Amino acid sequence: MQTTLRALTVGMAVCALCVCAARHAEAAPCASLGTQPIVYIENGDTQEPLVKRLGQKLLASASPVRLVYKNRRTCDLALDMYSATPMKNDAIAIKYIPSATEDPAWDPSKPAPSCDADAGGNAVDLGIGATYISSCTNLPAKPTDLSELTGPVQSYGFIVPKASSQIAITAQEGYFAYGFADATGMASPWVDQALRFSRGPTASTALTCAAAIGVKASQLKGTVPAGNTSTEVLNLVATSPTPEATIGLMGTEVYDQSRDKVKLLAFKGFGQRYAYFPDFSSTSFDKKNVRDGHYLPWAPTPYLARVNGVTGMANNPNVQRILSLVVSAKSEATVSGIDEVIASGLVPECAMGVQRPFDGANLSLYAPVEPCACYFDAKVAQGTTTCKTCTDNSTCGDGKCRRGYCEVR
Amino acid sequence: MSSRTTLIGAALAMLVATATLAAACDDTSTAVKEPAPGTVDSGGGPGIDGAVPGLDGGQVGNDGGPGDCVMNPKTHEEIINGCTNAVKITKNPTLPLLLADGGLPPLP
């Protein structure tokens, strides 16, 4: 019996090795994928939808650029950028955006294929975090040639299984559920630490959610899945056999793509009278409450790139192109940065009405220089707007015609 | 007979549409209430977006009223409690470890 068990174990181990080897053997060197210039990106896994969407458009554009990326936790990727650590082959797959010729059936909803870094690794051209870099406690002094630009806003939240009866969580409940071990916080029904799923303390999801409930990410008393990924948290919550006690932390644009699997709780912050969803309702996608300050767990996405000290432009022109599209919400003939941002579930800065200086900080009103609130309302999934359409300023009164709508400025 | 049935049907449809519109335009209709503290606190009842007032026997509250939200908010406290027509959910759970003054105890 023991011999059989041992044989079985050895057999399984061999099989696993074979699978790993086969998988590795399939991965081509990233550098030899094609003739297009490559931009190597490390990004929070919540930013993967945007990287995939934008990557597909950039590769199909008149000046094609290939995005090769690795999902990394925000503070880890920031450390890589601060210390100029190259992207290497390790447990986290390096992925690339395939062209229509390479995989005609691929679209951003599908997993991206993998490739291998060069033997010595590849320099990371762009880091895309998903919360305030100031929340990271693992960083040395910022190199003078490294620029941090504020990208679109990312919201986060607490997800529960579809079968849970819960629809809202207060900051105090979060504090007692995630701040205390096991059941000692007495925040019913979330009293089983094994079923309170979290992320590691360098992940933006953990940092921003923790800030919203008044704890540090390092103080979260939850269960971090083996791979410390959003996908694992999503699957563990979705398939929990004990739905009422199960809860997890999640970026809302990941949630937006998985609304059939889990539900997001409305959130009531400290000092708030009601709980709100990030969107107008649980079924809309407009991020209304993020944009006007009723929904609190959110942060902007920082873009880290090496820049010219004189011009302030990214050293790599293809990185500068991405920054213009995403951070400055510009458009090219076939690539609209703002459209891809909106379609990815993020909120461009120009559609925000509030701001904050760091994770968990108080909000203040914000008036974008070139607002796009009307455009955002019209373009977001299921969106509508009451704003007037226009072709020039003449019909906009005191407002200004931008992207076909009369915006307030 | 057939036209009378059609007329009645149309009238009923208009009535339902009017009621739905009225509910949609009423700010208070989007409030979802939870059971009062001390009763079962499930995080609210069904129909959160269906705006069914009182469905879960929640508190008859002042939600949506003029004194319940802040017009033209400026500060953080005002912004997070600003008037809105978005769906809002009343939740006041019983948390045994809360301090007497409603404050939070230090983390262990």
Image: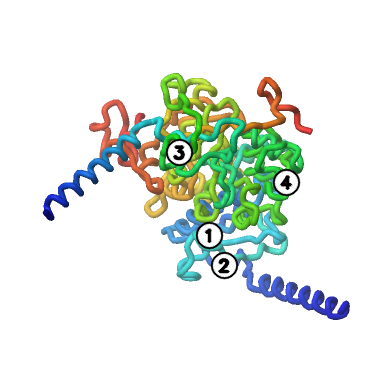
**Residue A83: which numbered mark, if any?**
none
Q: Quadrant of residue A369?
A: top left
Q: Disc 3 is attached to a residue of which chain?
A: B
Q: Nearer the viewer, mark 3 or mark 4?
A: 3
Q: Is residue A117 left or right of residue A324?
A: right
Q: Amino acid at mark 2?
A: Leu
Q: Position of residue B35 (x, y in %)?
A: 54, 34
Q: CA distance from mark 1 to mark 3?
A: 53 Å
Label 1, secondary structure: give it: strand
Q: Amino acid at mark 4?
A: Gln
At horizontal 55% and vertical 57% (from top left) the residue drawn is A67
Residue A305 seen in this snapshot: no
Q: Is residue A77 left or right of residue A334?
A: right
Q: Amino acid at mark 1?
A: Arg
Q: Which residue is mark 1?
A: A66
Determine contact: label 2, label 1, CB under 8 Å.
yes
At horizontal 48% and vertical 50% (from top left) the residue drawn is A344
Q: Are marks 4 and 2 on the same chain?
A: yes
Q: Disc 1 is attached to a residue of which chain?
A: A
Dot placed on the residue nearer the N-terminal end, 4 or 2: 2
Q: Position of residue A78 (x, y in %)?
A: 67, 44
Q: Amino acid at mark 3?
A: Leu
Q: Nearer the viewer, mark 1 or mark 3?
A: 3
Dot placed on the residue nearer the N-terminal end, 2 or 1: 2
Q: Which residue is mark 3?
A: B55
At horizontal 81% and vertical 76% (from top left) the residue drawn is A10
**Residue A193: which numbered mark, if any?**
4
| Label 1 environment density (alpha carbons within 10 Å; few <14, some 14–19, many ≥20) | many
Q: CA distance from mark 2 to mark 1?
A: 9 Å
Q: Which residue is mark 2?
A: A33
At horizontal 57% and vertical 43% (from top left) the residue drawn is A166
